[in-house]
Amino acid sequence: MRFLIITLSIAASLPLVAQQPNAPYDVFPEAEPPHYRVRYEASNTPGELTFPVKYTVWIPEGVKTLRGLIVHQHGCGEGSCKSGLTGAWDLHWQALAKKHDCALMAPSYEQPQAADCQLWCDPRNGSGKAFQKSLIDLGKQSGHPELAKIPWALWGHSGGGHWAGGMVLLHPEKVAAAWLRSGVPLFKENPDRTAIKPYVISDAVLKVPMMCNPGTKEGVTVKDGRFSGVWPANETFLTTLRAKNALVGVSIDPLTAHECGNQRYLATLWLDACLTTRLPERAGGALKPMPTKNAWLAPFLGKEATPEKEFSGDKSQASWLPNEAIAKAWAHYVTDTEIPDTTPPPAPTSVKADGNQITWTADADLESGIARFIIKRDGKKIGAVPEKDTNKFGRPIFQGLQYSDTPVQPLVQMQFTDQTAEAGKKYEYQVISENSVGLKSK
C-alpha cells in the first residue's frame, strides 16, 4: 500500500488545559426520545479533549437497525459552537437521515471565544476519541448499539470542515462521504504558522468522495480580509488529492463569504447520492466502493461540467462529480444556487385542533426543505407559520437558519392559534407545506 505524508500547519496553539463551560452553552433544547445526548467534561490529560462537549443524536422513528450516521459539525468560536446545540432538530437534515435509515448527530464543543479552535477541530487533539466514545454511550442510551459500528457521512463548516476532513484522513474506511464547507485540513506549509503532526494520506483516502464548498468571497473574488485564505487552502487540498485521482471536487458558493448560505440544497443531494451508493445493506458491513464510470469533471472555478471521458483539461485542476444528475445540480448551484426542484414536499400529518390551537407534524422535502406552513380554515387561508421570512443567510426556512446552518433558538413549533375562531362553532382546518422553491404539498 502506498502512503503520502503531508504536514499540517496550524496557528500556534494555546496550552492544553481544561476550559470551563460558560453561559452561551447553558440554553439548549432538552434531549428527549427520539433525541439522545451525552456530555463530557473537559480533560487535563494530554491527548484528550480540553473543552466540554455535548453530542446529541436523533434516531428516525421505527428504524430497527441503523445503517449509518450523518454528522453535522459546527465551526469555530462561541457563536458557531452554540449553533451546534440545535443541529439534531433540523428537519431538512432529518429527511436525509430518515431516507437512509441513518441517525443524525450534532456535536457542540463548549469553546470559549478566545480559545484555540484547533484544540478540537484537529481530531487528534481528543475530539476524535470523544466522538467515538459518544457513539458507544449513545448506542447504549438509545438502544442502538450499532451506532459504534456503522459508517459516517460527515458535514463540517469552517473548523468543522477541518475536523471532517481530518476524520477522513484518519478513518477513511469509516467515512461514506464528507462535505467540507469553508474549511479543510491545511496541507501547505506557512512560515507564520507552527507545523504539527503530519497526516498520512493512504490509498483508502483517495476512494472517499469529498466536496469542498468555500464562498466566493473567501479568496476567489474577494482576495483580502479575514477569510481570504480559505480558497488558497482549498486549492492546495484539492490539487494535492486530485493529482492522485481522489474523488474530490469543489462547489464555489457564488453568493457568500463564510456564512453557509444555500449550500444545504446541494449538500443534501450530493450526500444522498453518496449514501445511496455506498452504505452497506447491514450494520457492520463494509462500505461499498463509489462508482466512477459515470463521473463528470469541471474546472475548479468553472461553471460547466462534462463527462470525464470527454474532458480534455487538466484533471488535477478539475472537480470530480459522481454522475450527470449531480453535475447538473452543481452547475446551477455554482451559477446562482437556484437548483431546480419539480417535486412538491410531503403533506403534513396528524393535524389536530384543541380549541383554537392547531398542531401538526411534517417531514421536510429532501430537495428543498420547508419554507413555511400555510393554514386554511374552511378552505380559505387564515395565516402562515412563519408569517414573515426572517432568514438573512439564504432562502426562507421554517426553522430559521443560523450562520452555521442550524435552526435558531428557541425552536419554532408546528402550531398556529386561530385568533378569529368563534367559541362553539365548528371549523375544518387544513395545513399545507411549502418548500423553499415555492412548491406546495397536498
Image: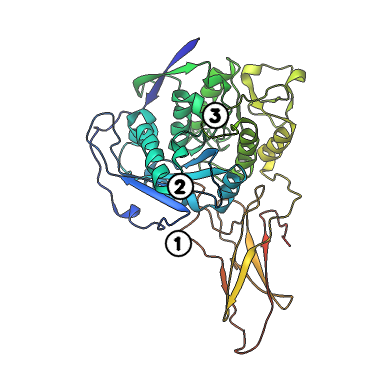
Mark 1 belongs to which amino acid? Pro
Please tell me how crowded label 1 is: few (under 14), some (14-19), or many (20+) other residues with Cα within 10 Å: few
Q: Nearer the viewer, mark 3 or mark 1?
A: 3
Which numbered disc, 3 or 1, marks the residue that appears first in the sequence? 3
Q: Position of residue 304 (x, y in %)?
A: 73, 30
**Amino acid residing under circle 3:** Gly
Q: Is residue 128 left or right of residue 174?
A: left
**What is the CA distance from the residue labelled 3 to the residue labelled 1?**
39 Å
Depicted 81 relative to depicted 203: above or below: below
- Disc on the earlier residue, 2 or 3: 2
Q: Position of residue 252 (x, y in %)?
A: 61, 35
Which quarter of the rendered picture does the C terminus lie within? bottom right
**Is residue 102 in view?**
yes
Name the residue carrying label 1.
410
The vertical placement of 284 against 112, above or below, is above
Is 250 in front, or is 441? 441
Q: CA distance from mark 2 to mark 3?
A: 22 Å
Q: Residue at image x 69%, y 78%?
A: 428
Q: Which mark, by number, is residue 57?
A: 2
Q: Is residue 226 visible?
A: no
Identify the element where label 1 is drawn.
Answer: loop
Query: Which badge, 1 or 2, is on the more N-terminal residue?
Result: 2
Where residue 433 appears, x then y in whole percent?
67, 61
Mark 1–mark 2 Cα distance, whole angstroms, equals 18 Å
| Mark 3 nearby-residue class (10 Å; few <14, some 14–19, many ≥20) | few
Residue at the (53%, 53%) spot, across then down: 401
Q: Is residue 249 above or below residue 368?
A: above
- In contact (CB < 8 Å): disc 1 and disc 2: no
Q: Secondary structure at mark 3?
A: loop
Numbered circle sitting on residue 285: 3
Left/right of residue 103 with respect to residue 291 in the rendered view: left
